[in-house]
Amino acid sequence: MENQRTVADGIRLGLRALVHAVLGGAALLAIATVASVLGPMLALDLYTPPVAAWWTVFTAITVQGVPFLLLGTLVSAAIGAFVPERVFQRVLPRRTALAVPVAGAAGVVLPGCECASVPVAGSLMRRGVAPAAALAFLLSAPAINPVVLVATSIAFPGQPEMVLGRLVASLATAVVMGWLWARFGREEWLRLPKRGGGQAPGGGPRAFVSGLQHDFLHAGGFLVLGAAAAATFDIVVPRSLLEVFTGSAWLSVLLLAVLAVVLCVCSEADAFVAASLSGFSPTARLAFMVIGPMVDLKLIALQTGTFGRDFAVRFSAATWVVAVTSSVLVGWWLL
Amino acid sequence: MRRYGPAVLLALVGAAILRVSLFSELYLRYVQAGLRPYLVVSGAALVLLAVAVAVAGVARGAAVHEAEGHEGGDGDGGGDGHEGAGDHAGHSHSDTHSHGPAGPRVAWFLTLPALALLLFPPPALGSYSAEREAAQRAAQGVGTFPDLPSGNPVDLTLGEFGSRAVYDSGRSLKGRTVRLTGFVTRDGDGTWYVTRLLVSCCAADATTAKAEVRGVEAPPVDTWVTVTGTWHPEGELGSTEAWPPVVDVTSLRRVRQPDNPYEKR
C-alpha cells in the first residue's frame, strides 16, 4: 500500500515537474525569441541621436567628476581619520563671525571643482568646525582656487577685471552666505553628517578606508543623479533660446544665472563656456561664473546626499539670490 | 552580495575608468586629454580601495561565518534611503564595528555609467549636438596673430581657422592652402559645413566651430572628412557676415574619426 502511494506520489510529482518544465520552457523560449527579434529593433529605434547624446553627456559629467570626487573624499576621509579636532579650533578664530571669512579665504587651497568640496565641508563639520564656516569654505573653494582663476584668465585674455570680479563676487557670496547661516540657519535643517554608513570608531587607517569607501560611494551615487539631470537639460533646452534674451540686460543676467544651474559645467571649464556666450553682457557672464560653482543640479544632488534635502533646497535658493546680487554689484563696480 | 556590495561597486567604477583611460583612448570622447593621468590614478585607486574593502570584509566574514542569503543590492537605488544603511550593521557580528555592510543604497546608481562604459561606451558627440548649438564664436577682438607655419597645405584646427578668418587683421590666411578635418553638418538650405566640437573640460561644455564648404558635393551628415582648399573672405573683419568662415575646397577625402573627436578650446 505504502509503496503504491509513494509511487503514485512520485509519478504525480514527476508529471507536475514535467508540465512546469514544458510550460516554463516554452514561455522562456517565446520570451527569448521575441526579445532577441524585437530587442535590437527597439534598441536601435530608441537609440536616436538625442538619446546617444544624452548618454555621452551623462557619462562625460560622471567620468570627469570621478577624479575630483575621489580627491574630495580622500581629503575628507583623511581629515576624519587623522586630523584631531583641536587643530581646527586652533586655526580658526573662535567667533563665528570671524571664522567665516577666514574659512572662505581658505577655499583657495583646495584645487578642485565643486564635486570635491562637498565631502570636505561635511567632514569639517563632523570635526567640530562651525557649520557657517564650513559652508563658506564649501562655496568659495571651487570658485576661487588658483586652477579656476588661471582658467578664467585664459578664457578672457586681456580682461584681468573679469578674474578679479570673479574672485571678489565669489568670495563675497561665500562670506555673506556663511554669515546668513550663522544668523538665520537652523540646526534642524542640517542633517549633520554623522557617519551615515558607519565609519569605524576612532581614527587610523581602518577609519580612513571605511570613511573613504562610504563617502565616495554615497557622493558618487548623487553625482550620477546630478549628471542625469544635467544631461537631460542639456538635451532638452534648445540653445537658440539664449538668443531671445540677449536684448535685455536684466533678463540676460537672470537667464545666465538659471543656465549656470541647469548646465552644471565644471568650475574649471565654465569660464570657457562663459567666454563663448558672446551675445551677453560681461555682468551676465560674471553671474554665470559665480553661480555655476555654487549652485547647480549636480551640487544640489550632492548636498542633498550629504546634508539632507531640507538643507539643500533652502541653502541653494538663498545662495542663488545672494550670488546674483553680488555679481550684479561687482559687475556694476568693476566691469 | 550585501557584504561585498561596496567592494563590487568600487571595483566596477574603477574598472570602467581604467577601461576608457588606460586601456583605450575612449576617454577622449568624454573629457579633455589632460585629464588622463588623473583618470588612471583614480581608477587604480578605486580598484585598490575595492580590494582593501573586500579584504576587510573577508576578515570580518571569517570571524563570523554566517550564511547570508542573496539579498539586497539589486541595483534599484531607491532615492535617498542611505541613512538606513547603518541599521543593518548589528546582525552580522559584534558591536565593535558599526559598519553598514550594504553601503549607501544610492551608490547603486553608479552601476549605470560604469556598465555603460564597460559594455557599450557611448559615442562621441556629433552633428546632432553641433546643430542644436547656436553658432558661437570665441569672444575676442580683431588683432594680429602669430605667423602660420610655412609650407602648403597647412593643417589648421577649425577653431584656429575660424579665429583667423574672422579676426586676423594681418590676413595670415590669404594665399594659403589649408587642410581642415571635421564631420559634415548641413543647413536647411543646402549649404554644408565641416564641423568640429570644441571641448575645454568635458563633453557637457562642447561648443561648435565650423567652416562653410563650397565647391564640392556634400557627403552624408556625420561623415568625417579632410578638406583642402583656400579661404574665401566674406564680410568685414569681426562682423557677423564673416561668420561662419568659408573655404573653397579643391579636394575632399573621407577619413576615420580621429582619436580625439574634439578640438581643445
Image (cartoon, grey):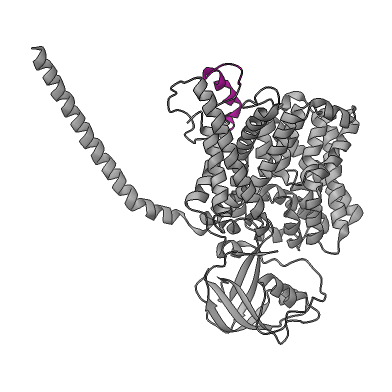
Name of the residue lying farthest toward the top = A1
Numbered-mark total: 0
Q: Which percent across, then down, holds residue B175?
A: 71, 87
Residue B132 position (above or below residue A37): below
Magenta: main secondary structure equals: helix
Q: Quadrant of the C terminus of chain B?
A: bottom right
Residue B191 position (above or below residue B130): below
Q: Is residue B37 magenta?
A: no
Q: Between residues A158 and B54, which one lies in front from this camera angle?
A: B54
Residue interval drawn in magenta: B80-97
Q: Quadrant of residue B183?
A: bottom right
Q: Is residue B90 magenta?
A: yes
Q: Which percent across, then down, holds residue B40?
A: 62, 50
Left or right: where A121 falls relative to B189? right
Residue A321 seen in the current view: no
Q: Between residues B95 and A309, which one lies in front from this camera angle?
A: B95
